[in-house]
Image: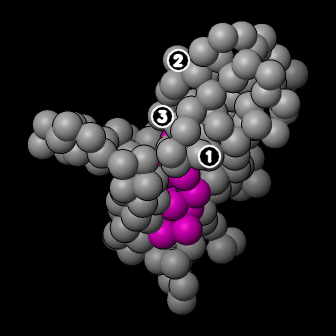
Amino acid sequence: MNSRPVEALGPHETRVLYQAVGFFFHLVLSLAVWGLALLAITLFHPEFVPPLVTLVVSLVVPLVAGFVIVKIHPSESATLPWMMGLIWWMLCGLHVLDMPTGPMACYHCGATDKLWLTFLSLNADSGLLDGQGRFIATWPAVATIGYSLGAKLGLRNADIPFENN
């Protein structure tokens, strides 16, 4: 493998490096915005927050953040975190499918029931992942999708100086 300092990289390699760094920056930023939104909900000390409210907050807050951030600093890499969110959700789904069932843990559930009750149901839970399936997989995936959608909306008619070369 050819190892050269960053200054010696050509324009194509430099572009790929900036895109990779931008992708991970926006991925972390989307999850940080989601975490701050959940922290803000928690600071109000609600007795019960319906899962639908958290789902909407997990979508809308990162969407607005992605839109604002891309308006300030346009980057096509900001539209890509949805892929990592989807991959994360699928990996968690695969883990849930491999989990054994038993009393208080989706007893006699099929594959569809395991996935639906663990990640998507708003009024029931499978008992798998200690009842935290939405928190561990669904809401972060929705946050990355929301951030990417906001970034895509913010990039309409935007001039991206480095990435258009």
Q: Amino acid at mark 3?
A: Phe
The magenta segment is 140-151
Circle 2 Cα neighbour tier, 10 Å, few/some/many (<14 / 14–19 / ≥20): few
Q: Which mark is residue 135?
A: 3
Q: Which mark is residue 130?
A: 2
Q: Amino acid at mark 1?
A: Leu
Residue bearing mark 1: 120
Q: Amino acid at mark 2?
A: Asp
Which residue is at 62% across, 46% downward? Answer: 120
Instruction: Say left or right for 164 vs 114.
Output: left
Q: Is residue 27 visible?
A: no
Quarter of the rendering containing residue 77: bottom right
* Colour convention of the picture: one colour
Question: Earlier along the polypeptide chain: callout 3 or callout 2?
Answer: 2
Question: Earlier along the polypeptide chain: callout 1 or callout 2?
Answer: 1
Tell me: residue 23, above or below residue 57: above
Q: Which mark is residue 140?
A: none
Tell me: residue 6, above or below residue 121: above
Q: Is residue 28 visible?
A: yes
> For the residues marked 3 and 2, what is the alpha-carbon distance in whole angstroms?
11 Å
Which residue occupies the foreground of this view, 66 or 39? Answer: 39
